[in-house]
Image (cartoon, rainbow, N blue to C red):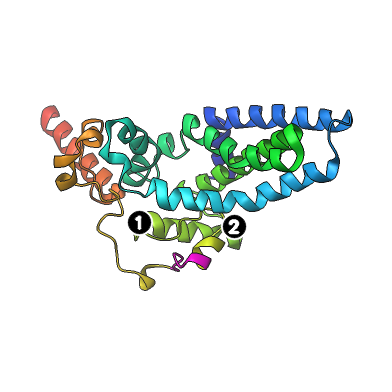
Amino acid sequence: MDLAGLTAAYFQYYAIAAYIVVALLSGGVAIFALAQGAAAILPVAASVVATIFIYPVVWYLLHRYILHSRWMWKSPLTAGTWKRIHYDHHSDPNNLKVLFGALYTTLPTVALATVPVGYALAGWVGALAALCTGVIQTCLYEYFHCIQHLGYVPKWGWVRQIKKFHMAHHFHNESGNYGITNLWWDKVLGTFYEGPKDRPRSPTVFNLGYDEEVAKSYPYVARLTPNWPYNTNPVHRKREEAAVNAAANSASAG
């Protein structure tokens, strides 16, 4: 896949279109309000800058303590959401259908993380400016997340590095490298690692700890997952499935 094809796939996803609409509306209203003198530019600018700095730590904490938690699968009220937003992604990391976060969880989370900060600094205009900034950051985050997972080799060295670290998170050990585009908090909080030489291979990297034994007590995710369980490398799994299907087709044709 080349960058043009990847970009086309990115913009075809409904959540990205929704984010762009929200960014245009919130940013447009904030700019109009500034032009009308409804708020001072410095506090609004401060809300934008604060959002830029707050965003990476919020998503680090969410990724580490919510998406990689082991409490969401324990309730039928949260198991389906956890399956959609992270279990499916880890069981098949390169599946475009579950590569992006679910809109119904991501957009409210962005609003909760940004709007109160913007409002505290610059009232409702700051809240809209902060929301716009957070949504734009989400779009950038998802774009680089696409690059990390799809079959494209980045030419920019920094992008190659973050792709390597993220692939280690998905294919070697999931208990580290929680940052997607910014690994500063991983380094500060001790969860960063360079690659396989730094940590042992995790037996739960593809199922996040949700295995057959867990499912005996908490069956909700298993019931929602066709062909469960997923405990092996998805690349190898798909090759094996393709070989089995090819053999079956050959036998039926013979």
Residue that label 1 marks = 171
Q: Position of residue 243 (x, y in %)?
A: 20, 42
State the residue at coordinates (11%, 33%): 251
Q: Is residue 167 magenta?
A: no
Residue 74 appears left or right of 2: left
Using the rendered image of the protein, determine whether residue 248 is visible from the camera's viewpoint: yes
Q: Residue furthest bottom?
A: 197
Q: Position of residue 98 (x, y in %)?
A: 41, 37
What range is drawn magenta here?
A: 188-194
| Quarter of the figure with residue 82 | top left
Residue 22 appears left or right of 12: right
Residue that label 2 marks = 155
Choose mark 2 or mark 1, whichever is in front: 1
Question: Judging from the image, what secondary structure is the residue with disc 2 in?
Answer: loop
Q: Is residue 191 magenta?
A: yes
Using the rendered image of the protein, determine whether residue 254 is visible from the camera's viewpoint: no
Residue 247 appears left or right of 81: left
State the residue at coordinates (54%, 49%): 58
- Mark closest to the chain's N terminus, 2 or 1: 2
Q: Nearer the viewer, residue 106 or 173?
A: 106
Q: Are marks 2 and 1 in contact (CB under 8 Å)?
A: no
Q: Residue furthest front?
A: 120
Q: Amino acid at mark 1?
A: Phe
State the residue at coordinates (14%, 41%): 216
